[in-house]
Image: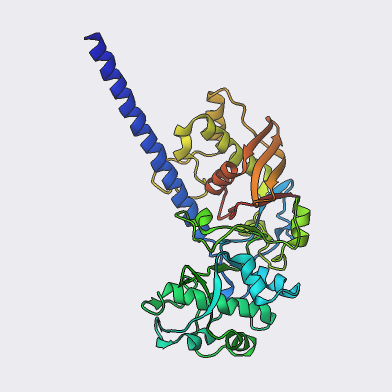
Amino acid sequence: KEAGFFKGEIAGAKAYQSKLSQQIASLTQKQQQIIGQRQAGLNLPSSLGDGPLYCTDDRGRDPGFSPAFAFFTYGIPHRVGMNQYGALGRAKSGQNHEQILQAYFSNFSFETRSADIDVQGYGRMPLETYLLGIYEMPGDWPQAALQAQAISARSYALSYTNNGANSICTTQSCQVYKGGNKGGGWEEAVKATAGKTMISGGQPVKAWYSSTDGGYTFANNDVWGGSQRPWTKRIQDTSSNVNSFGELNERAYDKESPCFYSAQGWRSNYTNSAWLKSGEAADIVNSLILVKADSGTADHLYQTDKPHPFGGENWNEDRIKQELRNRSITPYNNINSVSVGADFGSGQTTTVSISGDAGSQSFSGSEFKNYFNLRAPANIQIVGPLYNVEKR
């Protein structure tokens, strides 16, 4: 009988543990969903198809308070495949279109391909006619960059449509097509590379590209999950090896992009900048300390200047401080300094170290970014794996 009792208790405990793990997994999925929605709300373009980039450098903006902290991300999503501003930098350094593409893609060969494709809203047309109406790179950029873009766009279109069997959209969800003939340097690049396509495993490469990778590109599964496509790869996109932020700023091929190093998000009452007050930075740190001490508090740690996304209760700064005291943890009221450590081989912030009135602590770069992105006010976000902090 006693053995049966313990057996029942153990079974009950296991069932509770399973339920708890499911709750935590579900909550984590919800948090990821909210971060995805917040970042989508920034409306960051994935490529140059919508025209010039408008990232601003908040280092030149005075928010009206001090000390102030801002978290600057290198590049903007999605960082897979060809880096468009990187192609510009490589072209300026003397690389030709094949060298540029070989830098960003692996396990492919160049072959001549053609097809007719269906373009949504425009009907069926020859691939080369379609390419003349692609608006994904400024026409006054060097021919080497434009030719690399033309081959990428051709390869992507063939892959996306399964060699013309399916249709392709005309927005950045596919690639930007405006019809007609863009002319100029772009027309020259399309014609100079007519039919030239990247092929891997006998099929056109789905040649993803984005505007600004921030000095590093990643394999598709690093960014989107799933299995790795053999033509994608991770690279340090610099003229020579880098081991510091200073070297990265000097040597990255895409350093000319206005989105190469920028703090994303803004508040109109602080000169449209992403600067945070010391107490706001402390609140983000306190939230992270609390959830690490008690994962059951996670559902209360969304940003406080908007309603709880799932109808629950958001805890404000004072409540979080009290919850920490209830657990015999001294909360931060102010942060004095923040520094980061990074792996410059892979392009990821690895540690965030803070110092304030409650002492000094360090966190992993990924966990700090996650709770920063859940808790930061307005639409302020860290939008990539490599980020740094600025103080004024």
| Number of numbered discs overlaid on the protein picture | 0
Which residue occupies the extreme top position in the image? 2
Residue at 57% across / 42% down in the picture?
A: 367
The front one of 245 and 296 is 245
Vertical placement of 139 versus 389: above or below? below
Task: Tell me the quarter of the picture where residue 351 sits.
Answer: top right
The front one of 287 and 187 is 187
User: Residue 146, image x and y in percent?
Assistant: 63, 79
Which residue occupies the extreme left position in the image? 1
Residue at 41% across / 40% down in the picture?
A: 25
The front one of 136 and 96 is 96
User: Residue 31, image x and y in percent?
Assistant: 46, 46
User: Residue 7, image x and y in percent?
Assistant: 27, 17
Vertical placement of 326 versus 90: above or below? above
Residue 245 relative to residue 225: left or right? right
The answer to whether residue 67 shows anywhere in this view is yes
Residue 276 relative to residue 177: left or right? right
Vertical placement of 152 versus 344: above or below? below
Its colouring scheme is: rainbow
User: Residue 214, image x and y in percent?
Assistant: 66, 60
Residue 323 relative to residue 360: left or right? left
The answer to whether residue 179 shows anywhere in this view is no
Q: Assign the N terminus to one quadrant of the image.
A: top left
Residue at 73% across / 59% down in the picture?
A: 61
